[in-house]
Amino acid sequence: MEWQFILLIIGCILFLTLLSGLPIFVAFLIVDTVGILLFMGGLAGIDALVRSIFDSIGVFTLCPVVLFTIMGEAIFRSGMASRALDVLERLMVRLPGRLSVVAVSAGAIFATLSGSALGACAMLGSLLVPDMEKRGYSKSLSMGPIMAGGMLAVIIPPSTLAVILGAQGGISVGKLLLAGFIPGFILAGLYLAHIIISCVRNPSLAPMGETTTAKTNLGKDFLKYVVPLAAIVLSVLGSIFTGIATPTEASALGALTSFILAACYRKVTLQMIIKSATGALAISTMILMIVGGSVAFSQLLSFTGIVRGIVELVTNLKLPPLIIVAIMQVLLIIMGCFMDQIAMIMIAVPIFMPITAAMGFDPIWMGLLMLVSISLGLLTPPFGLLLFIMKGNAPKGTTMMHVYRSSIPYLVLTFIGLALFILFPGIVTWLPQYM
């Protein structure tokens, strides 16, 4: 049977199962089972499927997923994030559209601490959106920056999606994490420039001359609540960059440091520990179940010759290599309109990484481009997850169309950033080369 026909059968089954609303793990498991029965030896292959699932989630490189999740839960459950956010707001009091700037800045900072786009968006949305509405911020400058800030968690290390992508694609997890640092802050800078320029050109979008009622000393609070969080960043990124620790060891250091800081603030309680543990358990279990089901899917694609056929087809196209890279990113962005980010990684990596190797591109560069494209899926209508989280935190009377419109400027800016990273690979590869 030709690989094109096999791909059509597998693709239709996967599309229908995802469209039916089944959990992603179940969708992959159904596709794996049907594929094995039809193309990989029938019932004899089911035993191999079970072994493959257990082998895929038992790899050491996936440990940072759990540890980064614990670290983020400890930071948010202890209240360290909300206190640092208050200090940042006071620090930026003279900027136009202060709270919008705070939303993006806090998103970038908390992305380095938690790696959770959905968690950062939910937290910032619940803290900032009601206050911004009361102060007269437009919907575009209240919801859009919060979603954009949350999206940075996919790119800025430590990113759980970067760990998963690196593990599945055979890419150095440490180098891929570091590769997201400069591009992530470039995107944050683009978002901030858009907010400030918009407020200067049209002051009605956000109130000017906002005041703060805080009576405590700003410098003291900055040293007390913001600077200590740098210890977590240094414990993770510093140990990876200097080679002192592997990404797994660095994630353990980050988790430990977050609890030590929480203890210093006297916020470590039994309830906080239980909530952090249960939250991390729920998120990690979901991710590992998806990984388990999707690894067998990758093996199915390889065994049936689909990957080899696609690689040969693409490499024989008479197109410039960068155009092929751009086409791959467009495909990821389209996929982001309809499916979960982890599912995108599991479907795309087995196909895109062999193409990358065949064309001689740097896998770190391609991995980062994929992360940026995947982050766009969080904001892409109609099913971007950040759009629905923001709708849940929005004031009464806010429609999904309001949420969609508020995301458009940041989608455009992210497209611009993605184009820069494609045309100038050094932006991505400069920092990892020193590791």
Image (cartoon, grey):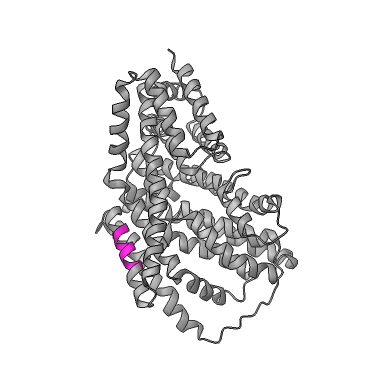
Q: Was residue 253 drawn as part of the magenta stretch in this picture?
A: yes
Q: Is residue 271 above or below residue 34?
A: below
Q: Quadrant of the N terminus?
A: top left
- Front-most of 120 and 32? 32
Residue furthest to the top: 1
**Residue 97 in the figure: left or right of residue 38:** right
Q: Residue at x 31, y 50 (%)?
A: 63
**Which of the 4 image quadrants contains residue 130?**
bottom right
Q: Was residue 26 drawn as part of the magenta stretch in this picture?
A: no
Q: Is residue 295 above or below residue 372?
A: above
Q: Residue at x 50, y 21 (%)?
A: 8
Start and end of the magenta stretch? Answer: 251-258
Image location (x, y in percent) of residue 320: 50, 30
Q: Residue at x 68, y 50 (%)?
A: 400
Image location (x, y in percent) of residue 432: 35, 51
- Front-most of 227 and 71? 71
Q: Is residue 348 visible?
A: no
Image location (x, y in percent) of residue 164: 38, 45
Q: Is residue 148 visible?
A: yes
**Which of the 4 image quadrants contains residue 293?**
top left
Q: Residue at x 36, y 35 (%)?
A: 295
- Front-most of 246 and 280? 280
Residue furthest to the left: 244
Image location (x, y in percent) of residue 38: 40, 18
Dominant secondary structure, magenta: helix
